[in-house]
Amino acid sequence: MLTVYVVSQPMAAAVRSKAIQRLLGTLLGAAAAVIMLPLLVNTPLLLSLAMALWVGGCLAVSLLDRSPRSYILMLAGYTAAIIGFSSVNQPAEIFSMAVARTEEISLGILCATVMHSLWFPSPVGEAIRTRISNWLGEADHWALDILHSNTPATINRDRIKLAGAASEIHILATHLPFDTSNLREKALVVRGLHDRILMLIPVLSSLSERLAAMRCERSELDPQSARAITRITGWINAGAPSEVIPQLLEELETLCSLTGTNDWYALNQIGFFSRLQDLVMALGEGRTLLNHLYDPQLPLLASLDEKIKKAGARPMHKDPGLALLSGAAATLAILIVCAVWITLGWDEGGASAIGASIVCCLFAAMDDPAPAIKTFGISLLIAIPLAALYIFFIFPAINSFPMLVLTLAPLMLPMGLIMLNPRIALPALITLLNFCNALAIASRINSDFASFLNLNLSMFFGMFVAVLVNRSLRSMSADASAKRLLHHTWQSLARLAGGQNNEETATFASQMIDRLGLLAPRLSISKDQDLTGLDALKELRVGMDLVALQSIRNLPSSKASTAVEQLLQAVAKHYASRTTANAIHDKQLLICMDHALSTFASSLPAGGVPQLTALVGLRCNLFPQVPFNTRVVKGMI
């Protein structure tokens, strides 16, 4: 019965996806329990250690994958605990217990899947189309705001939420293989669209920065830049038609070639035209792919079709250290509960171990799992009296399945409706979980109230230990979590600048933007002075500039390439130091940067505009308050 509520989702494809994941997780957990219990049942300490390590290990590995499929391993962990600890006193029945739970889960999955597929199914394809369309609409507004605002840099703070929306689209697209709409056959197109979304965020942020720098140098923009703004604005307002893209790109390329590199304004102007080219390409291709999703008969250009065929899956942020810590917390909580259970000879102590396993797994992805575990305990306090009412007063008065349905409906149906509200969906679900577990519907009524109370109250001890362990090892504030995300970002930038990371642009952008989406809500509630007013988009811009500069490493050795390589090594040292100390804006890095920028600009190679734009971007991001000096300082290297 609980499985129906767990796998139920607003979209039919998500239901099928969750159903398969729950079945696989149950089978894997049941198999683990069947293997471990008969071998270790006579050595309780070893059995407890094996179960704890299994739960903790499965949890740690599942946290490394933030897509919906991570549910498989997480469920496998606490399913083994549910089956194994419930069968300790009856080890000969372990296989029957495993089969019974698998059958129960399978029946719930079948019922939920059939009903969601037949009764007003909601395809995930339409939801993806709508979200991408809304996202590109927001990108249009962002671009127009940048081009027409006198202070474009301030606009970025209001657009960070688009990073979180990009990650949501990525996660939603994982359900496409289970969809019945024709969009299932366009998974590559959706992936290609997601790549354009990933590129638009750093491009628009960098475009805003270039325009702000130009306006700081001059009160009025030059005529060429003003005409380019008018041209691009008209193109966006017209819906970004693809047939105009080649002409726009050619015009912008011409403007780049005609612009000098003699002063700071000119260098930013070249970067501005270059970022407008990136905007036209990413936004134009995004609109073309979106139109193709709505009308598959619309042909794609051969070059664009080739690009999306080569697009690979994009990774999301991973935190192995935090995953290991969460797994260790679950393992330690289970071991403590099992030690008390074994020492006291507590008949119902297995329920405590099960409770600790469940709550440690369910809330491990949160910054601080303890409050959610406490909420779980409060919901159990609500569920126990309700379950007692049904078991000892209502169920003895009924004797048929229709009556069972009629008596459960007044509680179960409203709770299902409450789950549709995202704000209270989690409390409603865990209340249902506790109610269904406490109810434990079987073919015969167990009227032993003492056993019922002991079994359900023992869950509180497991939760109590889980709270203590998580508070001690795992819990962190929003500020601490934000700083941890920033440290991961700095480590990635240090590796990239040092030449230890050769990922392609979209892959690197995927991880950075996913971190940005995780960082934004934490920054919004932060009270730490070091985080207040932090430009969360700055590190993303730096990362994309570093990616653009990697190609210089493949060029023949020259004065300019040597200067850029020295700069990259200095940037790597700068970000490596930030992971262990406060930000370092050292003079040597500034000198190195100005030297590389002056040298590269004075001997700009053919096709070197993207790299020059990246150098200008690095200078603006790392030393925004220091005026650029084109003179080379003697003896600086």
Image: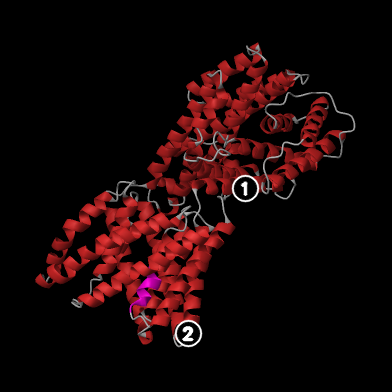
Q: Residue at point 71% right, 46% down?
A: 577
Q: Residue at point 65% right, 45% down?
A: 490
Residue type, numbered disc 1: His
Question: What residue is disc 1 on?
Answer: 487
Viewer-side residue, 39 vs 377 = 377
From the viewer's perspective, tell me whether residue 511 is left or right of residue 572. left
Q: Is residue 334 on the magenta stretch?
A: no
- Its colouring scheme is secondary structure
Viewer-side residue, 544 vs 493 = 493
The mark lying in front, picked from 1 and 2, is 1
Question: What residue is disc 2 on?
Answer: 40
Looking at this rendering, what residue extends furthest in the right direction?
Answer: 635
> In the image, is residue 389 above or below residue 48?
above
Quadrant the C terminus occupies: top right
Coordinates of residue 234 in the picture (x, y in percent) = 52, 18
Q: Main secondary structure of the magenta part?
A: helix
- Helix or strand or loop: what does disc 2 sit on? helix
Cα distance in 3D space between marks 1 and 2: 43 Å
From the viewer's perspective, tell me whether residue 262 is left or right of residue 473. right
**Residue 264 is drawn in which quadrant?**
top right
Q: Is residue 351 on the magenta stretch?
A: yes
Characterize the local packing of mark 1: few (<14), some (14-19) or many (20 or more) Cα atoms within 10 angstroms: some
Q: Earlier in the sequence, mark 1 or mark 2?
A: 2
- Helix or strand or loop: what does disc 1 sit on? helix
Asked whether the beta carbons under mark 1 and mark 2 sit within 8 Å of each other, the answer is no
Q: Which residues are magenta?
A: 348-355
Coordinates of residue 30 in the picture (x, y in percent) = 41, 74
